[in-house]
Image (cartoon, rainbow, N blue to C red):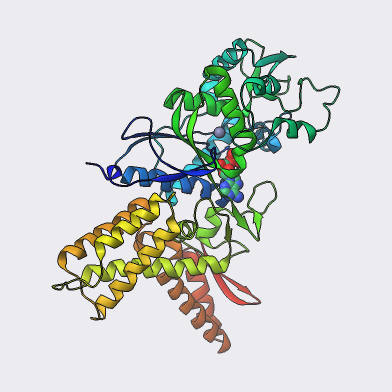
Amino acid sequence: MQLYQNQHLKVYNSLSGKKEAFKPINEGHIGMYVCGPTVYSNVHLGNCRTFMSFDMIFRYFKHLGYKVRYVRNITDAGHLVDDAEDGEDKIAKKARLEQLEPMEVVQRYTVDFHTILQKFNFLPPSIEPTATGHIIEQIEIIKDIFEKGFAYEANGSVYFDVAKFNKTHEYGKLSGRKLEDMIANTRELAAQDEKKNPQDFALWKKAEPQHIMRWPSPWGDGFPGWHLECTAMSTKYLGETFDIHGGGMDLKFPHHECEIAQAEASNGHSPVNYWLHANMLTMNGKKMAKSTGNNILPGEIFTGDNKILSKAFSPSVVRFFMMQAHYTSILDLSNDALLASEKGYFRLMDALDTLKGIDTGKTSDFKVADWRQECYDAMNDDFNTPILIAKLFDAVKHINLIKEGKEQLTAADKETLEATLHAFIYDVLGLEGKTDTGAGTNKLSEVVTLLIELRKDARDNKDFATSDKIRDQLAAIGIQLKDGKEGTTFSVS
Ligand code: AMP
Ligand code: ZN
C-alpha cells in the first residue's frame, strides 16, 4: 500500500483554471516535464524559484510513493534574444561577445546551473535532455506538421500556420487568449516579413551565413524554433499525452500555447493533462530578470557579497523562504523577509533537536495523528507549503511546551511526530540540517559579529595591531569585513 492511495491530491490546472483531483494516466506512475533553463548566463534566484517549486512537487510525488519520470530539459539552441521570432540566438550572441564556441557557453552555464541546484539540495531529474541532442526528432515533428497541413515553408524557414490550426482547434486555450483579439492587437506584417500572419511562429529558421549554430534539414541549413524542442523531448520520453507539464507563469504564452498547437497538429492529441505554472520571484516589486539587471545570483546570497542584503544567507534558509509562499503566488525578496525566514528556519531545526531529547509520558496532549493528516491535507491542496509550514510550527509549539514540562507525549506519538517532521522537512521541503548549511548559519554570524565588535573596541582604543589582526586573519579564512556608513558588515567567499 502506497501513501498516494490514501491521500487525495488536488492540483490547480492552468488549462481549466480550476483545482482538479489528480489522477495519473497509469496508476502509480507520473510523467512530468518542466521547461529547463536557457544556458547562456548564470542562473538567477528567480529561475531557481521556478525549478525549486517543481523540485518540491517532484519530492512530494516521490514521498507519496509514485514512480515519477521527471524530464527537465536544457535549452542550448533555438531560443532567440528577447524571446523573439527573428534575430540572434541567445547562446550564439554570448559566444560572439565572449569569443567562445557556443558549446563552451552551454557547458559553462550548465555547470553553473547544476552547481547552484546542488547547493539548494535539488533532486536530479530522471532525464535532462538537450535541444541540440534532439534535432532529428524536431525535424521529424516538423515533417509531420507539414503533412497534416499546418505548416508552410518560406525562404528556407518553416512556420506554423496559426490561423489554419485555429479553424479546427483552439489556439489560445491555455492562456485564455482569442486569436481574433491577437489579430486586432497586432500591427500589419512588414513588407519583408515572410510569415503569412504575425501570429505564426517558427518551427525551423533558415541560418544566415554568419549564424554559427546550424544543422542540415530538408529545408536547408538552419536551426529549430524555440517551442519545438519541448514538444520533441516530452513526446519522446513521456509519450504523446502525459500527466504534468510545468514551467514559470511567463512561459504560458507563447511557449506553452505553441507546444499545445504543435502536439495537436502533429499527432492529434492534447499533450498534457495538467498544466502547472509557478509564479515569479520579484525584487523591489519587479520581476527578477537577467535582461533588466533586477536580479541577484544565488552565489551572491550565500557569500553575502552583494549590495542588497545585510549578510549572507545559507541555501536552506533561502529554500525555506521560498517554501513559505505558495508556488502560484508572487514572492518578493527582501532583507527583512530573509532575516525572518532565517529565524523561523532555526526555530524549526532547534525543535527537531529538542524533540530528540524529550522524555515521554503516559498520555499525549498533542493529537499527533490528526496533526499528521493536516500536514498531508495542506500538501494535497495544490502543494500548499505555507500551510504545511504553519502546521510544522504548531508542532514546534507543542515540542517546546513538552520541554517545559507543561505538556506530555507518549513514546508512540513521539516516534510518529519525529518521523513526520523528518519526512516533511527533509524529504518534501528539501531542507538540510543546520550543520550542513555553511556560510549563513546563525552561529557563524554570531561569532563574526562578536569579532567585529572586538575589532571596533580595539580601534576605539587605538590598538591597531589587534584590529588589523582580526581583519587579516578573517580574510585569510575567506571572511571579508567591509566598513561602511552603517557600520561593518561581512561576506564569506
Ligand atoms: P530561462 O532560462 O529564461 O528559459 O528561464 C528558466 C525558467 O525560469 C523559466 O521557467 C522561467 O519561467 C523562470 N523564470 C524566469 N524569471 C523568473 C522569476 N523572476 N521568477 C520565477 N521564475 C522565473
Ligand atoms: Zn519548454
Q: Residue placed at 47% from the left, 73% from the top?
A: 448
Q: Position of residue 190 (x, y in %)?
A: 84, 26
The answer to which image quadrant residue 145 occupies is: top right
Q: Residue placed at 28% from the left, 57% from the top?
A: 420
- Answer with the quadrant where ligand 2 appears in the image: top right
Q: Residue placed at 52% from the left, 73% from the top?
A: 471
Would residue 177 be seen by someone viewing this image from the given angle? yes
Q: Position of residue 120 (x, y in %)?
A: 44, 52
Q: Is residue 228 left or right of residue 210?
A: left
Image position of 116 with respect to 157: above or below: below
Q: Position of residue 157 (x, y in %)?
A: 70, 17
Q: Residue placed at 63% from the left, 58% from the top?
A: 283
The answer to which image quadrant residue 98 occupies is: top right
Would residue 206 be seen by someone viewing this image from the given angle? no
Q: Position of residue 186 (x, y in %)?
A: 79, 33
Q: Is residue 453 left or right of residue 101?
A: left
Q: Nearer the viewer, residue 144 or 8?
A: 8
Image position of 263 with respect to 352: above or below: above
Query: Which residue lies most toward the bottom here?
Result: 461
